[in-house]
Image (cartoon, helix red, strand yellow):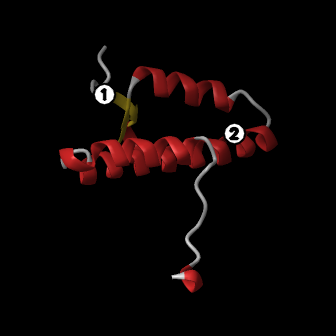
Amino acid sequence: MGYNSKVTGCETLGIYMTKTAVTAIKMLESLPEMIQERVADRLREYVEEERDEVKWDRAFKRKGKFAGLINKAQKEIREGKAVDMDYEKL
């Protein structure tokens, strides 16, 4: 089954997931509730990061002249070298 292939994960909720995602959810269900919550928090953070990457790619990767700058900025963010903008110093 390919990356974009989907299977029904929760028919009653109308949620569709890959078989791999369904397996991961089943594994999560076997853990104590406290651990499920910790894993879910980490997963939410990870999913948000991935969503941001998709948005970034859609918005900027098409603009070839900025590709090098974009890649450099993404690398600095991943490596923790990026800092928040101090608007007072502008």
Residue 89 falls left or right of residue 67: right
Q: Helix, strand or loop at disc 1?
A: loop
For residue 34, what is the image quadrant? top right
The answer to which of 62 and 87 lies nearer the viewer is 87
* Residue 28 screen position, x and y as percent: 66, 31
Can you give x and y, in whole percent of width and height, for residue 25 in the image?
Answer: 57, 31
Picture quadrant of residue 12 = top left
Q: Name the residue located 74 percent from the left edge and 44 percent from the top edge.
A: 38
Residue 67: assigned label: none
**Where's residue 30, x and y in %?**
71, 27
Which one is earlier in the sequence, the residue at label 1 or at label 2?
1
Query: Considering only vertical position in the picture, is 24 above or below 62?
Result: above
Measured along the vertical axis of the image, is residue 87 above or below residue 3? Answer: below
Residue at 29% in and 17% down: 2
SS assignment at label 2: helix
Which amino acid lies under the numbered mark 1 shown in the image of this protein? Lys
Residue 43 lies in quadrant: top right
Residue 88 vs 2, above or below: the answer is: below
Residue 54 in sight in this render: no
The residue that mark 1 highlights is 6
Label 2 sits on residue: 39
Is residue 50 toward the left or the right of residue 46 in the image?
Answer: left
Quadrant in which the N terminus is drawn: top left
Q: How many marks?
A: 2
Does residue 76 show up? yes
Residue at the image position 54 percent from the left and 45 percent from the top: 76
Q: Is residue 50 left or right of residue 24?
A: left
Residue type at mark 2: give it.
Val
